[in-house]
Each structure stands twice: as structure tokens, then as C-alpha cells.
Image: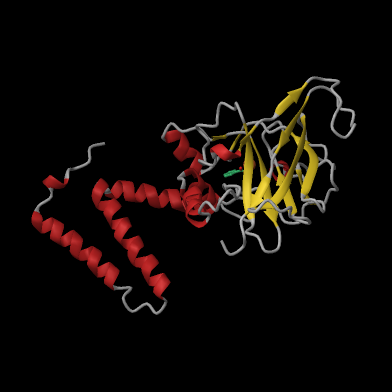
Amino acid sequence: MTVSSPRDISPEQVVREEDLVARVQASFDSCQDPRLKELMQTLVKHLHAFLREVRLTEEEWSRAIEFLTAAGHITDDKRQEFILLSDTLGASMQTIAINNEAYGDATEATVFGPFFIEGSPRIEQGGDMSFGAAGEPCWVEGSVTDIDGNPVPGAKIEVWAADEDGLYDVQYGDGRVSARAHLFTDADGTYRFWGVTPTPYAIPYDGPVGKMLEATGRSPMRASHLHFMVEAAGHRTLVTHIFVRGDELLDSDSVFGVKESLIKDFDRRSAGTPTPDGRVVDGTWTMVRFDIVLAPADA
Ligand code: BEZ
Ligand code: FE
């Protein structure tokens, strides 16, 4: 596709286009909510800049409307295509970056994703969050501290993951609850549990976002990861994942979620190696340590 250079546009045309931008922005002048006014006027500024820069054709405008309409149609209480769109355009990670400015050594946040569900089962320390999900067992242990290194006892840790076939429990549609749980840190701020070793999986690509990825030659694959959400009074809630060092998808995660500080060693142990809690495991297993540092709530 050729994009007309601004040189092809007559001065009269530039005035017409700029005049329209000004009139649309001015239509929000009397908005009583200053933040809403700023959002709308700035949106108009950048939207029109995009339209004018790419010299959008009417056919392309129609395709865009069809795309958004399809995204609306496929969206329901279990499928959120607009969040998927935001994720694949990097808008989710940009919003996270803006709102979670690095605070000392606090653990970095990353994308939430659509597969968290309220009301996960509680497990005790050393419990198994897999609840029968297929996958290589993984021992996960670590601590939760504040930025001064003090333990945070009683922190609520939510964990959720895809199974080795790359599916979350909700994607089976049979009501199963597996590979998700919550637990609380001990008095010394530590935690430990069994889960499944993360494997790569594709984000849902049977809708318009999948078509967009295909048309643009992009992969829907996410780097292998395990989701965490950590909540404790007086601290900023942390939504993050840990990623598997050595995973070949670390540089091409479809939702741009990978951060260097979140890449961890998942050490593989051969079959028969004694486990940290004496559990008998068939075959190989892995172990990973994830020490979590929470920023203060007002940071
Ligand atoms: C996930 O990690 O579960 C996820 C994140 C963004 C889009 C789709 C899935
Ligand atoms: Fe995920």
C-alpha cells in the first residue's frame, strides 16, 4: 500500500483537515469533567493524526468497523476480545508500565490476562494447585517481603496456569477447577506449593484478533509462564508472572509481557530425585524460587 506523502496534499486540504480536528476537539470544551475532557480531546487529536498520516481509505475504514463489530459479537462474560486486542497491541503492557513505575526493588508487574477467576480453592503450604491438571510437577517456593526486606506474613497469593496442553481449566467448558489456587504466606513471609511446569500456549486466536495476527504474520504464542497475584494490607497489589529461562518464545511473547527480572530458573530434576517435601513423583520434576517484593500501597 502506498501512503501519500504530506507533500501531495494541497494547503487548502490541510486547512480543511485541521479545521475539522479543531471543531471536534472544541465540541468537548464544555465538558464538566476535566479528566474526561482531556481524554476525549487528546483521543481526537491522536485519532485524527493517525487517519491523516496513513490517509485512511473509506474501504479501510469499513474494514476497521467490521473488525470492531466482530470483536463485539464474540465478546461475552467468558471471552473478552477487546482485552485481547489491547494485549496484542501492547496497550495493556503500556498501561501497566505507566501505572506501576519501578519502585526500588519491588517485583515488576505484567499483564493480567483473561483467565483469572475469583474464588479459587485454598491450599495449605506445600499443597498442590494443579488439582489433576496434566503436566510435569513443579515445586515453587519463595518469600514475600516489603522493600526494606521485612517479611510480609499472611499475604494472599493467587496462582493460576495452563496445563501441559496449553489450556486453562475454563477453556475446557466442563466446569472443572484445576491449575489454580490461593494460599497465604507463613509468619516468616515464606510460601511453597506444587504446581505444573509452564509450557508455551496460544492465546485464543479463533476470533478477529487471531485473524489480525495471521494477516500480519504474527504468532499467537505466549512464552511459558505461571501467573501470580499477591495482595497484602498496606502494599500495592502485584499482578505478575514468572517465565521459564531458556524458553525460545521469551523474545516473541504475543502480548509483550516478558520482563527480564521475571525470568526464572526452573531446574529440572531426574526421576527418583527426592523432593523438598518428600512427595513421591513419577518421572522428572522441576523447582523454581520466586522471591516477591511488594511496593507500599501509596507508592
Ligand atoms: C494469559 O497469560 O493468560 C493471557 C494474557 C493475555 C492474553 C491472553 C492470555
Ligand atoms: Fe497465561
Residue located 90% across and 28% down the image: 280
Q: In front here: 15 or 247? A: 247
Residue 21, picture quadrant: bottom left
Residue located 22% across and 37% down the image: 2
Residue 17 placed where, x, y %?
19, 59
Left or right: residue 182 versus residue 263 is: right
Left or right: residue 294 versus residue 135 is: left
Number of numbered discs? 0
Can the viewer see residue 257 in this picture? Answer: yes
**Ligand 2's quadrant:** top right
Q: In front here: 193 or 92? A: 193
In this rendering, is residue 117 above or below 281? below
Quarter in which the N terminus is drawn: top left
Quarter in which the C terminus is drawn: bottom right
Residue 58 placed where, x, y %?
28, 50
Q: In front here: 262 or 117? A: 262
Residue 33 placed where, x, y %?
42, 76
In this rendering, is residue 213 above or below 70? above
Left or right: residue 225 versus residue 95 is: right
In this rendering, is residue 62 above or below 223? below
Residue 193, picture quadrant: top right
Residue 225 placed where, x, y %?
64, 37
